[in-house]
Image (cartoon, rainbow, N blue to C red):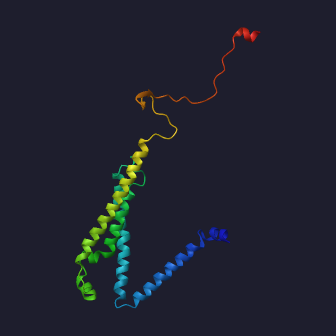
Amino acid sequence: MTGWWRRTYGAHPLHLLSLLACFALAGYAALQASRGPLPLRMAVWFIGAVIAHDLVLFPLYALADRSLTRLLPHRRPVLGAGGVNYVRVPALLSGLLLLVFFPLILRRSEPAYGAASGLNEAPYLARWLLLSGAGFAVSAVLFAVRAGRSRRAGDEPARGEPEPAGRSRAVGSRSEPAVRYVPAGPRPRPERPERDRDG
């Protein structure tokens, strides 16, 4: 049954159930928003946010991400292919917080916010900067740990590989020359003299 469903639908049945749950939740949220005092204004804001994201924000952060991947030296073994994620993830989280709370961070809704909650918007900018700095700091620590492990792994010779010729290692109080590695294999048989062949 599951194989037939995968061939017909293209994914696991839980995928369809999760999509239906998301649509139900979105429909419930839209229904509750339509009963509010300003449903038309919320609809205009939602449509404007979608258009602004697809036509303005998405090209901007896609360009920033591509510029970041070109600036970072991927050829270094410390960074690797995923080294850009140590900058990408905290920047994405900081941008997401700014996108969600920008009216409070930029203090654009202070009269309405103060009338509804009795608070002011002054702490939001400092908190956003603190959270953004903490995200970049944690990412930098994780990157430093990974870089240290990569360098130590690169300095140690692989297990079973001999040391390069010309180096010597100290044994007690004297130094012994390094031994060249000769691959094991069948030894060639010596040729017999001609008279032994004739005999």
- Residue 45, image x, y percentages: 34, 80
**Residue at image coords 34%, 89%:** 38
Give the vertical position of 66 relative to 103 (above or below): above
**Residue at image coords 37%, 66%:** 58
- Residue 68, image x, y percentages: 34, 56
**The one of 31 and 1 positioned closer to us in this rendering:** 1
- Residue 22, image x, y percentages: 49, 78
**Residue at image coords 52%, 79%:** 21
Residue 172: image quadrant is top left
Give the vertical position of 10 relative to 165 (above or below): below
Whether residue 56 is visible? no
Left or right position of 23 against 144: right
- Residue 164, image x, y percentages: 45, 32
| Quadrant of the rendering where the C terminus is positioned | top right
**Residue at image coords 61%, 71%:** 9
**The one of 86 and 183 positioned closer to us in this rendering:** 183
